[in-house]
Image (cartoon, rainbow, N blue to C red):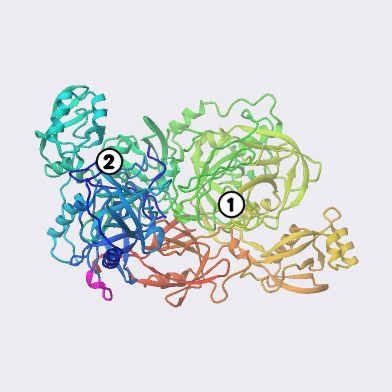
Amino acid sequence: MGDPLERLGSEAASSMGLDSSIKTELCMEIDPPFQENSATAEDWRKALNKVVPAVVVLRTTACRAFDTESAGASYATGFVVDKRRGIIITNRHVAKPGPVVAEAMFLNREEVPIHPIYRDPVHDFGFFRYDPNAIQFLNYEEIPLAPEAACVGLEIRVVGNDSGEKVSILAGTLARLDRDAPHYKKDGYNDFNTFYMQAASGTKGGSSGSPVIDWQGRAVALNAGSKSSSASAFFLPLERVVRALRFLQNGCDTYVDKWKAVSIPRGTFQVTFLHKGFDETRRLGLQSETEQMVRRASPPGETGMLVVDSVVPGGPAYKHLEPGDVLVCVNGDVITQFLKLETLLDDSVNKNIELQIERGGTSMTVNLLVQDLHSITPDYFLEVSGAVIHPLSYQQARNFRFQCGLVYVTEPGYMLLRAGVPRHAIIKKFAGEEISSVEELISVLSKLSRGARVPLEYISYTDRYRRKSVLVTVDRHEWYAPPQIYTRDDSSGLWIAKPAFQADSLFLASGVKDVRNLASQQVSRNGEPTRVGHMHQDNNQESTDGITSMETNCDDASEHVARQNTSDAGPKKRRVEEGLSTDGNLVAEFSLNEAKETKLEKSSTMQDDILMDCQVGTPPSANASIAERVIEPTLVMFEVHVPPSCMLDGVHSQHFFGTGVIIYHSQDMGLVVVDKNTVAISASDVMLSFAAFPVEIPGEVVFLHPVHNYALISYDPSALGLVGTSVVRAAELLPEPALHRGDSVYLVGLSRSLQATSRKSVVTNPCAALNIGSADCPRYRATNMEVIELDTDFGSTFSGVLTDEHGRVQAIWGSFSTQLKFGCNTSEDHQFVRGIPVYDLSKVLDKIVSGANGPPLLINGVKRPMPLVRILEVELYPTLLSKARSFGLSDDWIQALVKKDPIRRQVLRVKGCFAGSEAENLLEQGDMVLAINKEPVTCFRDIENACQLLDKSDTTDGKLHMTIFRQGREIDLLVGTDVRDGIGTTRAINWCGCIVQDPHPAVRALGFLPEECHGVYVARWCHGSPVHRYGLYALQWVLEINGKPTPDLDAFANVTKELKHGEFVRVRTVHLNGKPRVLTLKQDLHYWPTWELRFNPDTAIWHRNIINALDYSSV
């Protein structure tokens, strides 16, 4: 494992690796040979005047995670080494091994685009090219490279973008030329087989790629990394840099638009050497005669020899060389230095060489084939569902001790992460077929249909001896583009994408029929029409043994944040950062049939016959309550995944768990209700596991209540099979009478092992008003709700239902999300559970079953009209009448309100109106709502009932006749209401890597929209995208692009589809805090085309449509 104090000296925004070369003769004497150093301050001034204009600030963006590097944007340094050809040198970890977009900014702030032309497979250097003719107003000269000038005691200056300061000049003295290559990360880029120089120059982030110059203005080394605990900085020797530069210069005499790809020979036999002193080699068994021979043949002052540190499995030296072997000769020549060995290897690619070694005092001769290093350096990758997969590189094979070329997961994306495949995994088997190459993986993928569930086996370097098996679900919706292969083109510096295979139409096909008047009837198990949704269940049903709590272990899935919720029974949700790009070692737990594929079609007769003989559920516990026995067959465990590509509406997590209850079950449709802290948005993948029958099937979001904390999820009963359909049932809802303080209820839910557990509790407060503040990133929060509190429960992560003694559901025991704030800048997500009365839920269910008059939605192949909800978009809160009296409310009104509701003794006050609502500018903060249509109002349900009455009247124009109390006066107002559907956000646009949507209710609830044109709202952004690079982050509205207003998504799409690739765009924004801003960003259609994700209710599928992409014919 690397030294945690050693770090790369690159941009502060990313963590990267480092590289080096070595001099032929290194002096390690305590008193090095004296060299006259008579440089004066004037000499340094002249040198710096010549050097500084040739040093550039590099702004780089890694567009995709690849090999050792993650996606991200950062700053670094480079310097011109060939002005005529336009060549800039920097570090490899700056040039990136994968797709990169970069610009160079010169001293006078002139900016030019640059393209990578070479990055060394091992050492930490790479080259960019630029057009010299683009620099019109700056006189500068290239910096000469002088590796031979480096020596201990040499006074140097490091010139670069240290700490992001554009130009910093740090002084130092070379103290060592023989430092081991620093080891930074066990799973990232590390340089090896070279020495490094060291000086106490104190470089930090942003200085990677800075020239280390002498008083004559020559670069003697390349700055690469530093140690955070001291001022030590690490420099790469330039011998191999000079060699590579000469190859590039020989390939092209001058700058040309189309760079000719240059092949730079690099050889290896996949062995890592360390330079050990002679004392250590003797302890390893080196014979004294061999030592004397080596000393005579080596340069004066040689202090040691090269010793094998590690051998990569499957490489040319595997099973020929072993750790501890001492290298004596290569092709008959004594080799004790890295540089001489590497020179010989580079000149012997695809040739055999003879090595003489000593192993434990025994002399041995080994013949090895020198392998082409570029052949084991991947130059292509597969992108599927956000995952980046490519052959395992030499760098990572050395880190993990795996064979080069295995199928390596750099970034798991969505589909693999959802299954629990972590970063750095090696895929071994997929869909029952062994996988040894990316091509074989592509072949298997091409045979799968959308929604298919297949097993995958992988190994990881942390547990290399055991294969792990997970179940991968192919995306049913078009969350991502079809699989693509990106291949590096060294001529253009780009990675060219092409389809991985010809994709057919893979959507689930089913007949569509309109049954608006059919949904009110359904067929029960005995074939008789019945209303299962409200049918009382028998009390003698089988039940599983209960346990006392449900605990889940869901650590943060983000790469950058790893924190644990400290709630009562452990965290329930995974948290993610604002940025889109998320990963982590996320292990999924499968409760049911992990290794088996769950089909979406109807179960076959043979399968049903087999299942008919199995035991459904476990025998009921002897002490299980009647309520538990009745309700258990209706309970469902939810596992919900939100794709990073469409984290809309401020959803705060990518992975949710929770318990729901079936409220409707027929042969055509099943409906499950669950809280919105489990199913937060409609753009989700939902998996349902049933307590009554061991099966896991997908569900679809069909209704999200715009106010109340519940969602309705549909499932296909035919997917349960005959046995499953017969044992799964719907719960009976009991909306009336309402619960009162002191009533006894049964709290019933599921554990993660799908075992029912229950306890008898007492209602302590049946009408507790919620008061949840807005989160830092606005998201759904329950408002205008009264919930039920109990004396005892199972902790803050246990959800389920509240029933009476007969198992009739009186409330949903649901999870609520909130954010606790500590000070001005610190906050933490928390959750709590409360009871949600089923009064409103029962009404919505009646509308769905009987046939509503809202927009149709395809559910299991049947178009069903979904209900609309009329609401007053005003956030209210209760105030005690004793407080209201102090504000001047009259005794008459106080008596009227007490008479209406002697228990609550409260009046509702306005906290704020939703921006853009019908009530905006009519009601003001602090208004007391006294009556609607002359009827006193004391609770939220009174207002909801008044809104529902408007739907039955044709004369009110959707307005409420409200009596309010404002600043000592009674006022009568006609206040408009709003009609909302239950689908939520159904459209988003991804432009330059940010997700743009219409302002969702949680944003509008803040009471502010930009006055001019409202604008579209930036919900999320992607790492490595143009918006990351130029700072167009989330939580702001985009008002204009290039002076053209973007009031809504249609206008935004029309403006962005006209923008050209590489065009700089002027964007005017307003932040949530009201701060306006104008910024520019460069559009990149090559890696970040503009696309739209839209839900189609006719197909119940999220479709992806390209709005603006690069036309390669015009490039």
Spot occupied by residue 222 in the image (x, y as percentages of width and height):
28, 53
In the picture, measured across the screen, residue 439 lies left or right of residue 70, that is left
Residue name at image x 54 percent, y 26 percent: 615
Q: Quadrant of residue 798?
A: top right
State which region is magenta. 131-139
Q: Is 135 within the magenta?
A: yes
Q: Which numbered marker is on residue 519?
A: 1
* Rendered view: 99 above or below 616: below
Spot occupied by residue 558 in the image (x, y as percentages of width and height):
47, 47
In the picture, measured across the screen, residue 1036 lies left or right of residue 839, that is left
Depth check: 157 or 420 in front? 157
Q: Which numbered marker is on residue 980?
A: none
Type of the residue with mark 1 = Ala
Q: Quadrant of residue 146?
A: bottom left
Mark 2 or 1 closer to N-term?
Answer: 2
Mark nearest the camera among 2 and 1 is 2
Depth check: 1 or 567 in front? 1
Residue 676 shows in the view: no
Q: Quadrant of residue 367?
A: top left
Task: Find out whether the residues at labels 2 and 1 contact each other: C-beta distance under 8 Å.
Answer: no
Which secondary structure lies at badge 2?
loop
Which secondary structure lies at badge 1?
loop
In the picture, measured across the screen, residue 765 lies left or right of residue 249, that is right
Type of the residue with mark 2 = Ile
Residue name at image x 67 percent, y 37 percent: 794
Q: Which numbered marker is on residue 30?
A: 2
How many labels, in total? 2
CA–CA distance in space, label 2 to label 1: 92 Å
Depth check: 94 or 880 in front? 94
Quadrant location of the N terminus in the rendered image: top left
